[in-house]
Image (cartoon, rainbow, N blue to C red):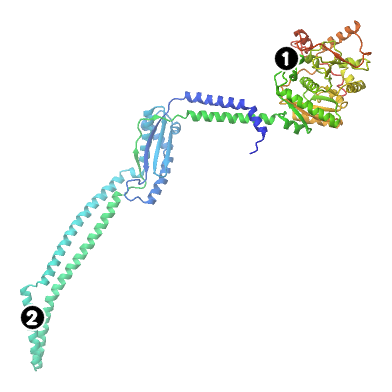
Amino acid sequence: MNIDMKYVRIVLRWAWLFILAAGLAGAASYWVGKQQPTVYEARARLIVGPGIDSPNPDLNALRTGSQLMQTYAKLATTRPVLEAVINELGLETTPEILKKTIRIKTDQETQILTVVVEDTDPIRAANIANAEAEMLVRLSSAAVSTRDQVREQIVSEIARLEEIVSATEARIRELEAELAALEEEEANPDPELQEIIQTTENRIKQLEELLRTTQDITAQQLIQDQITRERARLFEIQQARDQQRQFLMNQLTQERARLTDAHRTLAQLYASLQESTTNQVKIVEPAVTGYPAASQLRLRVLMGAVGGLILALFVVLAFEYLDTSIQDEKDLERAAGVPMLGSIAAHRTLTGSGQKRLIVQAHPDSQAAENYRMLGTKLQFASQSNNVRTVMLSSTTANDATTGELALNLAAALAEMGSRVILVDANVRYPTLSTLLGLPEETPGLTDMLTEDSQTPVATRVEWLPELAVVPTGPVSAESFKLLASARMTRFLECLQEQADFVLVVAPPLLAFADSLILASRVDGVVLVAYKGETLRESVGEAVRQLHSLGVHVVGAVLSYKTLIQRRMYRPASRVRRLRKRVSAKAMKGHPSTSDQPLTLEPTIDRGVSEPEQERDELAPSPPPEGKAEEMPEPAHATRA
């Protein structure tokens, strides 16, 4: 997974803010949580619907109970219910406040409704939970006395039906006994009745025999009538027995049907008696004394820390969005559109002057010193490929005083690699070379050589690095811009170029003064210096566009991670007058002119030891008088710019 290093650097750069925000927010959440009183929690559980009362629960009834549970959960926190609880317990609160202390939990799988109450008093929490549960029970239609009345009616009806069943069963037994007796009688008939039947049958046979032998029609008619009467008598005897059996069978069938209906009705009544009502609410577990609720202190601290991180993230995003300064090499390369020559690692600012002030001399094994050597190597290759020998170094920051130190370290690195280097401090707005090297005030400077008619400029050799020579700024005046813009400056650079492999020129900021643009047009190339977190992307792009518009070759850009030292853009007027007086005094004392001297590298004393505090104070800009604005003389090139 490819991660843009830009975001990694942003996180690392603002890590302190993330840690601080999370720590402060977490600590605040912890303190607030500790200030809260102990909260006790009480629970009362109820069952909604048929539940476990019914021996054969109906699925539809269970579903209806689940839906009713949601209804009761909503009713529990309504104003009428809460007001009833307040009135019953005599609470000194309002329904709105009480509602915040009550939570209703529902379980669709078990039809259990839980009333959870949180309060600072454990007994009051239990009382409120139980009162809330009782209110829900009262709201249930199955809780009224009608349910008991219906149950009593069912019980009485069951008792009546049981009596009917008992009587019917007794009657059935009687009928079965009579039927059994009748069947036994048929199997073992009564002798008298049997004798009557036998006599009747014999009599019928006799009459039939007589009928066959008699020829008289009248006699035959009389005999036939007698046979008919005997047969009718025999039929009546048999029919009486069959009717009695049929009667007993019909009675038995009716009684059995009656018994069956009674049993069916009893079964239904018993089922109704055992069946639970769907719309009912029962308390299955009343609340007891409340117990301390689970502490959410850790969660609050975690949420506070996360909130702090989110707030810090928004702050960082806002700063990063509003911050248009250069943050890394990619930023500088995109803004400038020129090759990146390298970057200078951050390092602490050294004190003193001379070797002690240069990182490449004082700490040659540091990362910054190695960066300067790599930058010098790239300049050597650029010199060989593009014939770049005079290079101007400048930034875009208006009050930059660090580019001089960067140029001096680069010049020292080139000199260490065997190149002859002359470093010219052309930043007449704020000279730094004399201070860095601890040069005496009488050292010939750039303005001296451009003011006088000398054709052979003098460069001061650095004793502890023979391949390096420097030309400080010299006395500064309002005419310094004219000197830099004159033809003498061009001849001066050409003369120095003949005597060295590299001529490095320190110039004022590009966008602040026209001096830099004039100097840029008279050198072989320009190295643009940017400072992390200080130089703006827009200013870098504008500086490159201006250089290209003049046809200036931009060798590349350098990013310095060292903290930018910012100074006033102009020397105070008192400082300018003081320098003028010193130059005039030297001339009156017969200071030797350099007009007849050949181009030499003038040796100077080793300034490895720090200069006295008084001398450094004189080289530093004087602060403005208290309560008054510093005098800023208008530069001579203001109208030209």
Mark nearer the N terminus (1 vs 2): 2
- Residue at figure coordinates x 39%, y 40% from the top left: 113
Q: Is 527 on the left-hand or right-hand side of 286?
A: right
Q: Is 179 on the left-hand or right-hand side of 53?
A: left
Q: Are marks 1 and 2 in contact (CB under 8 Å)?
A: no
- 1 or 2: mark nearer the eye: 1
Question: Which is nearer the eye, 132 or 145?
Answer: 132
Q: How far apart are marks 1 and 2 (CA)?
A: 163 Å
Q: Is 139 on the left-hand or right-hand side of 591?
A: left
User: Label 1 is placed on what type of residue?
Assistant: Thr
Q: Quadrant of residue 140?
A: top left
- The spot of residue 187 in percent (x, y) is 11, 72
Pointer 2 local density, CA inside 10 Å: few below 14, some 14–19, many at least 20: some
Task: Please say whether residue 242 is visible from this viewpoint.
Answer: yes
Is residue 453 shown above or below 397? above
Is residue 604 shown above or below 325? above
Residue annotated with mark 2: 200
- Residue at figure coordinates x 79%, y 18% from the top left: 569
Residue 351 numbered mark, or none:
1
Task: Please say whether residue 478 is visible from this viewpoint.
Answer: no
Pointer 1 local density, CA inside 10 Å: few below 14, some 14–19, many at least 20: few
Q: In which quarter of the image is residue 416?
A: top right
- The spot of residue 438 in percent (x, y) is 79, 12
Q: Quarter of the image containing the N terminus? A: top right
Q: In which quarter of the image is residue 227?
A: bottom left
The residue sitting at the bottom extreme is: 215
Question: Which is nearer the eye, 248 or 523?
Answer: 523
Q: Exactly how many numbered labels are in the figure?
A: 2
- The spot of residue 285 in percent (x, y) is 34, 37
Considering the numbered disc 2 on the image, is that residue within a helix, a strand or a loop?
helix
Question: Which is nearer the eye, 480 or 166?
Answer: 480
User: Label 2 is placed on what type of residue?
Assistant: Thr
